[in-house]
Image (tube, rainbow, N blue to C red):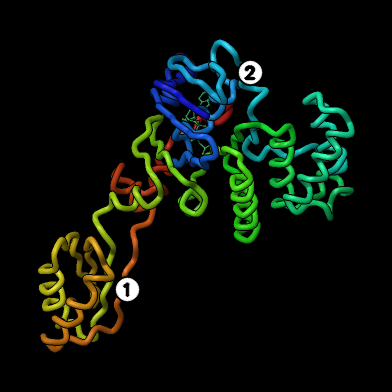
Amino acid sequence: MIKARGLARQFKVRGRAIDAVQGVDIDVEREELVGFLGPNGAGKTTTLRMLTTLLRPTAGEAVVAGCDLRADPTGVRKRIGYVAQGHGAGSDQKVLDELVLQGQFYRLSKADSKRRADALLDRLDLTGVADRLAGRLSGGQQRRLDIAMGVLHDPELLFLDEPSTGLDPQSRSNLWEHIRALRTAGSTIFLTTHYLDEADALCDRILVIDNGRIVAEGTPDELKARVAGDLVTLTVEHPADTAVTSDVASKLEGSQELQVTGQTVRFRVPKGDTALMPLLRELDNAGVQPRSVQVQRPSLDDVFLTLTGRTLREAEAATPFFGGFRA
Ligand SMILES: Nc1ncnc2c1ncn2[C@@H]1O[C@H](COP(=O)(O)OP(=O)(O)OP(=O)(O)O)[C@@H](O)[C@H]1O
């Protein structure tokens, strides 16, 4: 559905070159839900704007929904849906009218447009607000209306830019259910996000982008497997027991990144759950009583840290934002 090779975009700002996207390769298969994950300023929106024909690449090639990006941008536009970041439908139209107009914009007959609008309102849980002004919807309803607008013409491929930004946790998980349902119904979806939990919960596959380059690619589980194992956190009753505990932990097969803070010993092992029994047995033999033991699977944040040496939050804090120059 998407095949991009060496896609790049440079911006010139006051004589200074900004390499926003530095030659990315992207492959998305039909009916896949793929996430483009990276911190603010990593190049996600720029890539999306290139793939949706809104921005000309400075280098590279792409075939999107069967059409060549450079040779047939009109063909691409006909076959895709695009929901921009915080897009927001017009405020002075009723929800249903807004959708019917959108359908007519795509040259559907009024009757067809109304039929599809009704079906989408039902699928996206918006039937109850069909007669409300679009500008009066809650944040979550607004985003669902944006998505309905994006899929009304039944595109083969849907692009979503930061779909859940600005939503409260409940509206986010509700939106995720709707996005998953669209995928289950046969849509191919490419979305950008800087939320690790969103990428983890939604995506079949994730591309991680940092400073305009793809630094990793895989299923959420494959990416997590790149981190050196599960994190075991063990707290002991007496400070004097930490030396024995860290000694026992360091002897477990594959144990690494051992750290002691106060009465807490932390380390990574390849399979935390299976390592737990021998660990507790050894500690019992040594007369150590742990107060608590916790095993955590690596998060995508750990993956980002492993790949780039920075947490997503640090990466975002360090990214210069060229306010006023955004297209
Ligand atoms: N029109 C533009 N002119 C100049 N620089 C730009 C322009 N658009 C984007 N940039 C710069 O290109 C880089 C990538 O920006 P982009 O918006 O693609 O990142 P992003 O990953 O989508 O970030 P966010 O999550 O904040 O949307 C940033 O440094 C940004 O400031």
N-terminal of the pair, mark 2 or mark 1, is 2
Looking at the rendered structure, the kind of residue marked 1 is: Gln
The residue shown at (63%, 18%) is 75
Left or right: where does residue 252 sit relative to residue 138?
A: left
Judged left or right of residue 182, residue 249 is left
Is 229 located above or below residue 303 in the figure? below
Image label count? 2
For the C terminus, the image quarter is top right
Give the structural element (helix, strand or loop) at label 1: strand
Q: Nearer the viewer, mark 2 or mark 1?
A: 2
Q: Dot 2, how many residues are within 10 Å of its Cα: few (below 14), some (14-19), or many (20+)?
A: some
Of 240 and 219, the residue lying toward us: 219
Residue 149: image location, x then y, percent: 74, 37
What is the number of the mark on residue 294? 1
Note whether residue 46 is visible.
Answer: yes
**Residue 18 seen in this snapshot:** no
Looking at the image, which is closer to me, 139 or 28?
A: 28
- What's under tag 2, amino acid-wise? Gly
Q: Is residue 318 left or right of residue 239?
A: right
* Residue 75, disc: 2
Residue 185 percent across, percent down from the top left? 63, 45
In the figure, 15 relative to 49: above or below? above
Q: Locate residue 95, reporting x and y percent.
A: 83, 43
- Disc 1 crowd rating (10 Å Cα; few below 14, some 14-19, many 20+) is few
Tell me what residue is drawn at x 34 percent, y 49 percent. Answer: 222
Q: Secondary structure at mark 2?
A: helix
Residue occupying image coordinates x 56% and y 18%: 67
Residue 186 screen position, x and y as percent = 61, 41
- Which is more toward the observer, 39 or 279? 279
Q: CA distance from mark 2 to mark 1?
A: 53 Å
